[in-house]
Image (cartoon, rainbow, N blue to C red):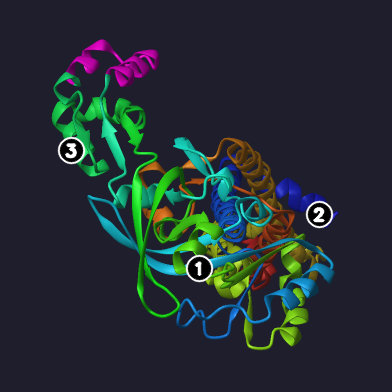
Amino acid sequence: MTATIAWKNIWRNHKRSLVVITAVTLGIISGVLLIGILEGWSKQRLQDAIYNEVSHIQIHQADFMNNEEINLTVRQPDNLIRVIDSLPGVTGWVKRTRIVSMISTPWAASGANLYGINPEAEKLVSHINQKIVPRGGRYLDAGSPSDMLISDKTAEILKLKQFIIADSTLDKLRMAKVPESLLAKLEPLKEKRFRSPVDFRNALRKAFSKKELDRYGAILMDQALDYRLRNKVQVTFSDREGNPVQGIFRVCGIYKTTNTSFDQSTLFVNADALAALYGASETLTHEIAILLNDTKDAGATAEKLIPVSTGNSVMTWKELAPDAAMMSDYMLVYYFIFIGIIMLALAFGIINTMLMAILERTKELGMLMAIGMNHRKVFSMIMLETLYLTLAGAVTGMVTGWMLAALLGRTGIHFTSWGEGFEAIGFAAKVYPVVTPAFLLITTLMVIVTAVIASIWPARKALKLNPVEALRTE
């Protein structure tokens, strides 16, 4: 009967109850979407770190990560490979040559890690072959030993990424339904080469209004983009005796991941072609990368490899990509922090509403206590009223938030204005929100706890009422 009375009491003042329910609903929706975005970013960062950058486990010579010298190769790699092949849960492995080098074109130069790989074996542990940009050429081919795969960022640094307005560009813009009046403004820019996105963007700002750029700027940049494929890139590094070595490679393809720092420092060539430069009879192994069926098995598998890796270091993805590991490990903490802040703010509104309800019903509460309703039942009634109010808004908010997150999880949210900044620290500019059952369970528990805590002050206020004085209240 107490539960029934409590439910009826919250609807005695519809407007006030609906305001509280609406506030809780909006708060929960914002919390669900915020956590969904963080969860989506966390999963994307983890996926990109493992399948583009570090794999699940890497093995190096013990001193290699501190001093990346060409002579610090993995010790007894063949014995390690035999052990790796015998371990359960291993999807694939690959041996890589890794040399710090200087790369240059006639227009610019930069430092980078030059990876010598077997292109087909690399596909077993890496998705770099799937990251080739549109109109960005192709992946490495073992049949073309002089090929080099570079990133979009490296192409920009080496001035191999240019923007040019040609007749073919104008035709593509017409097909994209760009107005002829805007195309006419591009005539002064025809056949001019802009070797920097900033230079081309500045030229567009002079030719177009801000409104025109906001609407057509992205498609103008995209259609004018041109990569200088097959251009020569000179590579310089020190061989095993410390002598400078130079070689020429041709750019066969351009890749792009969500981590600008990784892209800027990572190039790929055929391992055999790289070995020919440093004069070794066989390719040097500086790194063995291992991919597993389950990310959770990385620690256990590494523990099995450590006893047979004398003179080598065995590192899991958590050590190699600590940013992804921290975000993945602390998601539960993020849940409590963000939902806790939201519920703390809502608790004050709930307390205020319930105190108002107590003041309005002073005479009624006095009468209930006078006819025999004990303190426990009065406390239960106030607590249930608070719980009903909070849960009504929370359930509505979680269902609505989950539906919005599911919809955005298919379409994605593109943070265009901050995309470059996010990618600079390894996070995708386009995020797909994810709402997990664990989050919904935690949110439900926190809502219940908040409602119980918020009911204590109003309930104590009701219990302190003197029935005789309360009955005299007008």
Q: In which quadrant of the rendered view does residue 332 lie?
A: bottom right
Query: Could you tell me how far apart the alpha carbons at marks 2 and 3 are, in whole angstroms?
Result: 67 Å
Q: Nearer the viewer, residue 110 or 466?
A: 110
The residue closer to the viewer here, 302 or 143, is: 143
Q: Residues within 10 Å of mark 3 (few under 14, many from 20)?
A: few
Which image quarter: residue 188? top left
Q: CA distance from mark 1 to mark 3?
A: 38 Å
Quadrant placement of the N terminus: bottom right
Residue 169: give x, y in percent of width and height. 32, 21
For residue 202, which numbered disc appears in the image? 3
Q: Is residue 377 left or right of residue 281?
A: right
Whichever of labels 1 and 3 marks the residue nearer the N terminus, that label is 1
Q: Which residues are magenta?
A: 167-185
What residue do we see at 45% from left, 62% from top? Answer: 114
Is 179 magenta? The answer is: yes
Q: Residue 27 magenta-drawn? A: no
Q: Is residue 327 left or right of residue 395?
A: left
Q: Height in image: 249 above or below 298?
A: above
Residue that sits furthest to the top in the current view? 180
The first of marks 2 and 3 along the sequence is 2
The label number, if any, that marks residue 98 in the structure image: 1
Q: Is residue 191 above or below residue 71?
A: above
Residue type of the residue flagged with mark 1: Arg
Inspect the image, locate mark 2, and give the three-letter code of the amino acid beneath it. Answer: Ala
- Residue 210, numbered circle: none
Q: Position of residue 168 (x, y in %)?
A: 33, 18
Residue positioned 68% across, 43% down in the render: 399
- The amino acid type of the residue labelled 3 equals Asn
Is 295 above or below relative to 40? below
Which numbered mark, 1 or 3, is in the foreground of this view? 1
Label of residue 3 in the image: 2
Q: Residues within 10 Å of mark 1 (few under 14, many from 20)?
A: many
